[in-house]
Amino acid sequence: MRPAPVLAAGGRTLGNILSATEWMLPSPATQVHTISVLPSHAPSPAPQFAFSNLTTALRSSGGKGDEQGTPRFDVLRDDLLHPLANGNKARKLDALLPLLRRLGATDVITCGGCQSAHAAAVGVMRLVEYLSNLSSFHNDEEVRIVVDAGTGTTAVGLALGAVCLGLNWRVTAVMLADTLERYQEQEKSLISDFKGLCHEDFHDLVGTDGLVHWVDRFSPRRFGKVLSGEITSCRQVAQQTGILLDPVYTLAAWEQAVDLCCGDGRGAKVAMIHTGGTLGLFGLAQRYPLHFGATANEQA
């Protein structure tokens, strides 16, 4: 890992700025679970892979796992940050809520896009700095960060944090709600806003665009549509790893992480940001009751 660049103005770094900021969350820490990807022996059309949560397996067995040499990736469990608000929202409001409290606000109403545009770059830069200080990330020069992209601002914030900290990290964002051109426009707009708010010494570190690697979902569809077999895939992951995914957001990032650690990204550390989405499962249960009732449990 390259050292964080020291900026000209009094030797300030991004870390100095983050440490001087008041935060909602007492710590930027998140649980990191390592997932082993195994070939599935189940007949088609069952899922192609099976999974094992090495982190929880090691805790329960007290020893080493037996999947040495198999592809694996890390899952950053931001879904566990808050019991009600999923991790993505908690991160985005991390710096904003203390400011609103100082201004006397008692209630906050947000929508995803507006909230993201105002707060994403700083609510996730703190996470990037935390991860860069972990020994498991410090020892890996090349890191691939995978995140699902609704508005795309979490991805841009992660990429900005990596650039400003001098990290050789690549952020891959799975596009879920818009076209490549619109995501690239959003990226340019957020970078421009960041430059307008941050110290001028950051300007040379951050380009105008191209920080995020935007990719299509493996099975593109209109936003919110759930394809056949995807709820079953989420159930499989939950049964094998104890990690809850939703088919709209986090399953898309999970599939991309699996592909990277088994294919082009092999040799680099692959880490998926679990942005939450768990509350969305309640709405899906109403839309697809057969997948969530007693019958579904019996079939599983």
Image (spheres, rainbow, N blue to C red):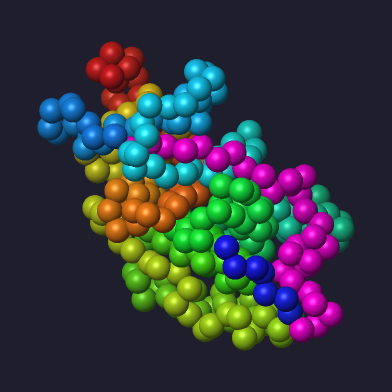
Asked if 204 appears above or below 145 in the picture, the reply is below
Give the magenta part as a residue range: 8-37
Magenta stretch containing residue 291, yes or no?
no
Asked if 58 appears above or below 152 in the picture, the reply is above
Residue at position x 42%, y 44% in the image: 73
In this orientation, which residue lies closer to the viewer: 181 or 256?
A: 256
Magenta stretch containing residue 16, yes or no?
yes
Q: Is residue 76 left or right of residue 24?
A: left
Give how far across and how far down residue 259 sits, in percent.
Answer: 30, 50
The quadrant the N terminus occupies is bottom right
Give how far across and how far down residue 274 sits, in percent.
Answer: 50, 45
Residue at position x 69%, y 49% in the image: 28
Residue at position x 32%, y 17% in the image: 297
The quadrant the C terminus occupies is top left
Q: Is residue 177 left or right of residue 124?
A: left
Give how far across and how far down residue 92 sits, in percent.
Answer: 63, 56
Q: Quadrant of residue 230?
A: top left
In this orientation, which residue lies closer to the viewer: 242 or 95?
A: 242
Give how far across and how far down residue 211 sits, in percent.
Answer: 48, 73
Asked if 228 appears above or below 285 in the picture, the reply is below
Overall secondary structure of the magenta section: loop
Asked if 67 appears above or below 15 in the picture, the reply is above
Residue at position x 64%, y 76% in the image: 194
